[in-house]
């Protein structure tokens, strides 16, 4: 096997493990637990995530978006989405919950929607 293919496969395996553990790590972090020894399918796994100060631009309700979106996405990823309507953003939040098992409290939905439509909604000229 070509060395580049081996490196690509190793990177893919690391990314898969990271994505698989992300919801557990985010949940543990929110609860104040250490993320050093989490279990996945009965196996103990350890992952060290770099400390980051990646936050979304300061706007009303940014805290709710930071708390719920940045556990899986970078600020750059969130801000570089197409300009969606409020209904489309609501569907995206629902998709994160149902398809990707994101632990987004329902009481944060309105704040997240307000934030996302303000910074990246159909009328995005308001902030940019």
Image (tube, rainbow, N blue to C red):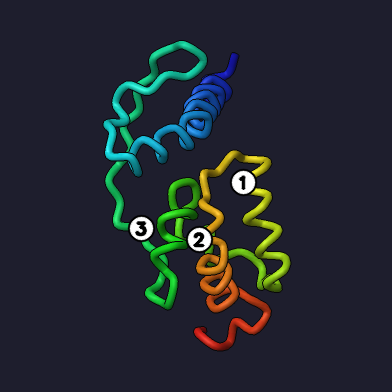
Percent position of residue 7, x then y: 50, 25
83 sits to left or right of 106? right
Q: CA distance from mark 1 to mark 3?
A: 22 Å
Quarter of the image that includes the N terminus: top right
Percent position of residue 39, x then y: 42, 19
Q: CA distance from mark 1 to mark 2?
A: 12 Å
Percent position of residue 85, x then y: 70, 73
Percent position of residue 12, x then y: 55, 28
Comes first in the chain, label 1 or label 3: 3
Q: Quadrant of residue 38?
A: top left
Crowd band around label 1 with a 10 angstrom C-alpha radius: few (<14), some (14–19), many (20+): some
User: In this orientation, which residue lies closer to the viewer: 116 or 108?
Assistant: 108
Crowd band around label 3 with a 10 angstrom C-alpha radius: few (<14), some (14–19), many (20+): few
Circles 1, 3 touching at the beta carbon (< 8 Å): no
Q: Residue placed at 35% from the left, 58% from the top?
A: 54
Q: Secondary structure beneath disc 2? A: helix
Disc nearest the viewer among 1 and 2: 2
Q: Which residue in the protein does label 3 denote?
A: 54
Circles 3, 2 touching at the beta carbon (< 8 Å): no
Q: Which residue in the protein does label 1 denote?
A: 97
Farthest bottom residue?
126
70 sits to left or right of 84? left
Q: Is residue 5 above or below residue 70?
A: above
Q: Residue placed at 55% from the left, 74% from the top?
A: 114
Q: Residue placed at 62% from the left, 40% from the top?
A: 100
Q: Which residue in the protein does label 2 denote?
A: 108
């Amino acid at each position: 096997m070509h060395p580049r293919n081996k490196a690509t496969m190793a990177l893919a395996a690391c990314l898969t493990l990271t994505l698989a553990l992300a919801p557990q790590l985010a949940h543990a972090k929110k609860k104040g637990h250490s993320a050093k020894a989490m279990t996945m399918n009965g196996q103990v796994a350890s992952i060290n995530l770099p400390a980051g100060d990646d936050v979304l631009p300061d706007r009303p309700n940014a805290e709710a978006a930071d708390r719920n979106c940045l556990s899986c996405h970078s600020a750059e990823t969130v801000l570089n989405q197409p300009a969606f309507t409020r209904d489309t953003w609501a569907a995206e939040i629902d998709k994160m919950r149902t398809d990707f098992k994101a632990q987004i409290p329902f009481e944060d939905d309105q704040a997240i929607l307000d934030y996302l439509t303000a910074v990246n909604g159909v009328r995005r000229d308001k902030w940019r």
